[in-house]
Image (spheres, rainbow, N blue to C red):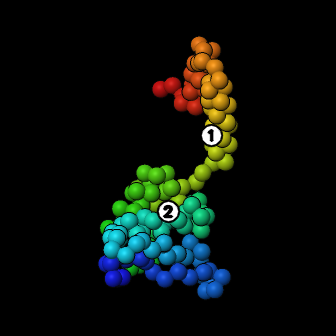
Amino acid sequence: MTEAGDRVGPASHHPSETGDDPSATVRQPVLRPQGTYISKSDMVTDVLRDLITDGQLSPGTPLRQRNLAEQFDVSNTPVREALRRLESEGLVVTDVHRGATVARTESEELEENYRILAALEALAGSLAVAKITDDDIADIEALNREVVPAG
């Protein structure tokens, strides 16, 4: 524990130095200002989010609660809470029989999202100059039907 009572996680190590599996690498999160409390669950969530978004935990990597609890020197409860939070953010997928894994992002989905974003930005740029028309609304509705299937 630091003077502020924070848990900042285990010391970081690099796979190239130890020969460990990269999925077992835990990086120390950025320290918060002195006097700021961070719960164990928040600490685990922050570190796992960083590892996933930085690509240190690749899509499909299993996230075993017991192993993570040992790595972070916490009980299973903060790990379970962290995995639930990350699942709500779309970074983790939980299967009842297989446990949690790092979510897979489909390149096609990402490409489609970027195309939609580009179309919306172009539309927004044209709307800044002109008023929205019935044709514009029809285009937006058509895009919406493509993205969100009826049902």
Who's the residue at 53% across and 65% down the image? 50
**1 or 2: tag closer to the N-terminus:** 2
Residue 48, compared with residue 93, is above or below; it is below
Who's the residue at 64% across and 45% down the image? 110
Mark 2 residue crowding within 10 angstroms, few (<14) / some (14–19) / many (20+): many
| Residue 49: mark | 2
Q: Position of residue 142 (x, y in %)?
A: 60, 22
Question: At label 2, which amino acid type do we have?
Answer: Arg
Residue 12, compared with residue 102, is above or below; it is below
Q: Quadrant of residue 53?
A: bottom right
Task: State how many labels appear.
Answer: 2
Q: Quadrant of the N terminus?
A: bottom left
| Residue 113: mark | 1
Q: Secondary structure under badge 1?
A: helix
Q: Position of residue 137 (x, y in %)?
A: 58, 18
Q: Is residue 63 visible?
A: no
